[in-house]
Image (cartoon, rainbow, N blue to C red):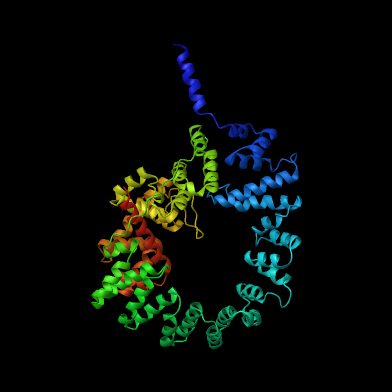
Amino acid sequence: MRWLPLLLLLSACRAQELPPDYAFLRRGSVAELRQVALAGEGYARMLAGWRLVEREEVPLAERAEYAWRYALFLEGARAFGPGWEAQAAWRVAAPLLEAARDPRAFSAWERLLPEEEAVAALLRLGAGERLWESLFRGRAYEALLQVLPPGVRPELRAQALFRLGRYREALPHYQAWAEADPRGFLGLGYALWRLGRREEALAAFARYPHPEARYAQGRVLEELGRVEEALAFYRGSTPEGLWRATALLERLGRGGEALPLYLELARTPSPYADDAALRALVLAEALGDAEAREAAWGLLEGGLALLAGKAPKPPPLPPPSPPLPEAARVEALLEAGEEDFARGEARYLLWQRPEAWPHLVPFFYRLGLYREGIRAAWPTTLAYPRAYRAWVEAYALKEGLDPNLLFALLHVESRFDPQAVSPTGALGLAQFLRGTWADVARMLGEAPADPLDPESAIRYAARYLRWLLERCEALGLGGVEQLACAITAYNGGIGYTARGLAREGSFFAFFRFQERDEPREYLGKVLSAYAAYRAIP
């Protein structure tokens, strides 16, 4: 029986063997890498080519092809994480393609606009309409103004000048555009408005018969204090115009006129629909309008329905997905302990076979790629993983929270990405700013932990959310209003929320008339995720 341990060892080694392409990648000779890059499969083929890009013994045109291919893959995969930025790959691919005199060089450089090097390259490689369009789309407005011939494409010149803040210079070009296309009057009106020439702006907007122009007229008239005229224009404008009209009417004590507009807005496919349905319900109850209340109740969906005691519909199940044979490579890489390769293979498969996402998303979650998995699975039940479950449930229990609420918060804040960094500097799973993180550390009686550490982020989020719930209770709120107050304060700050509640006198009035849109939208997202987690076993 001495041979039995040897057989078991050989069996374990075979179970952990890398797929052949990845074994070649591990060895990494130029010959082996070229073999995989030219005839390999999946992510291994992409990565082998990328590793050859800097090997000067490989012909230039071949290296340029590999760089183009890899940059396209990163662009399509839209992955999160260091080393997966498509822009960095395009910075390598673009000069290689240009050096190889490959016509795709223009497209590669175009992706790097408005960087100065990319602008210079496009000016070398392009001319005419294609160049002008590219510079405009890439926000290289100064370069566009330099190469655009006088009198040609006035709409591009006008918009470039507007976006540079040169409104007075833009006026004659908007006028030239408007002679051929009435859309030019919309831009002309906005430029005149920015210059403080409101009456002229109104005249320009009036010459463009479109809801967006009516909205702009309403804004100018409201600014001039001509409220009744503003209301008339808002009524026939955009969803944002209807939202502003309802606020004006309510502030004037004309809730009865606002109510049908709320119901109209609730029927639109706009970001204001759920907010309008909730407000219509609140207003109908206040006015004793049973028919309008019934209509609002029927229109109320999403997370905000929880504020009215209505359970929203659960997320749909993912569609059936046939087995994906290629996924065996991901499994083999995981068994071999090669998580980096497995991540690349999973991303490659999703890029190539987007319809197979129900089969692939569980691999993304096993690999910790929650943001990408959620994006692929949205809006089905598979888009609501219980990431970091042990920590979430333990710290929620410690703070007396529903774990589903904590899951929902982290889902909205970062999609469970512990390395997430927002444009405003918020960090980690729970997206804390440094100052708030330090405040929570003081609540816990400790030195600040690392905000990018997932367990610490979950622990701090649970403590902070409990503190916010207590503060909202002290403000006289209970039940679902207390919960909504705490969630709003997590995004907007407890000071902002407390001041708004004091100013408006009730939570629902504050929710409608708060001066910032973001906390209102944030509350709807968190409550939607909360309802989803509660509905999913």
Task: Examine the rendering and report whether any part of residue 74 can be seen.
Answer: yes
Residue under the image location 41 percent in, 87 percent down: 228
Q: Position of residue 51 (x, y in %)?
A: 65, 40
Q: Position of residue 66 (x, y in %)?
A: 67, 45
Task: Examine the rendering and report whether any part of residue 501 can be seen.
Answer: no
Q: Position of residue 399 (x, y in %)?
A: 30, 50
Work out whether 347 lies above or below 262: above
* Closer to the camera in the image, 478 or 307: 307
* Closer to the camera in the image, 471 or 428: 428
Q: Quick one: quadrant of the N terminus?
A: top left
Q: Residue furthest top?
A: 1
Work out whether 438 lies above or below 330: below
Work out whether 108 lies above or below 212: above
Where residue 388 sits, quadrant-wise, is: top left
Q: Position of residue 470 (x, y in %)?
A: 29, 59
Number of numbered callouts drawn: 0
Residue under the image location 36 percent in, 69 percent down: 275
* Closer to the camera in the image, 270 or 528: 270
| 112 left or right, relative to 438 | right
| 92 left or right, relative to 9 | right
